[in-house]
Amino acid sequence: MTDLHPHRYPKHADPEKGQVLGGECNRTVCKAHGAIWFNIETRGFYCKRDAWAINEDPFFGEPLCIEVEEKPSLEEMDRLHTEFYERARKRRA
Ligand SMILES: [Zn+2]
């Protein structure tokens, strides 16, 4: 069983969906595998197509989904999240 972050979104009925590096994409309607893009906000993994679509949103000022070679630990997920929003806040200041 893989580590599940308490703030992951959404909480799929299949707890591995979107939570396994290289597994099924976290997007509810997507069945693609090979999900290696980690979304800092949802703490889930996405297929390339969905990750790139999410990253096109200019709202955050930098990509929300990052390609990773191993699953971040829960502590690393929190650090990524904190640092991401600190950078976003500074850009808007
Ligand atoms: Zn997908």
Image (tube, rainbow, N blue to C red):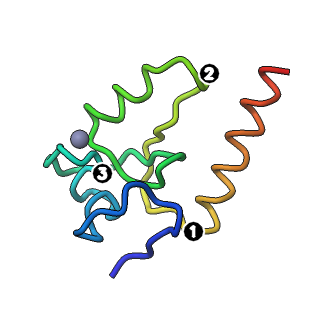
Q: Is residue 5 above or below residue 67?
A: below
- At 17% from the left and 44% from the top, the residue drawn is 30
Q: Nearer the viewer, residue 89 or 37?
A: 89
- At 44% from the left and 61% from the top, the residue drawn is 70
The amino acid type of the residue labelled 3 equals Asn
The amino acid type of the residue labelled 1 equals Leu
Tell me the quadrant of the picture where the N terminus can be found: bottom left
Q: Is residue 87 above or below residue 35?
A: above
Q: Position of residue 59 (x, y in %)?
A: 57, 21
Q: Secondary structure at mark 3?
A: loop
Q: Residues within 10 Å of mark 3 (few under 14, many from 20)?
A: many
Q: Relative to residue 58, is residue 85 drawn left or right?
A: right
CB of residue at label 3: within 8 Å of ligand 1? Answer: yes
Quick check: marks 1 and 3 in contact, CB under 8 Å? no
Q: Quadrant of ligand 1?
A: top left
Q: Quadrant of residue 51?
A: top left
The amino acid type of the residue labelled 2 equals Gly
Mark 3 or 2 closer to N-term?
Answer: 3
Residue receiving disc 3: 26
Q: Residues within 10 Å of mark 1 (few under 14, many from 20)?
A: some
Q: How far apart are the alpha carbons under marks 1 and 2?
A: 24 Å
Q: Residue furthest bottom?
A: 1
Q: How far apart are the alpha carbons under marks 3 and 2?
A: 22 Å
Residue receiving disc 1: 74
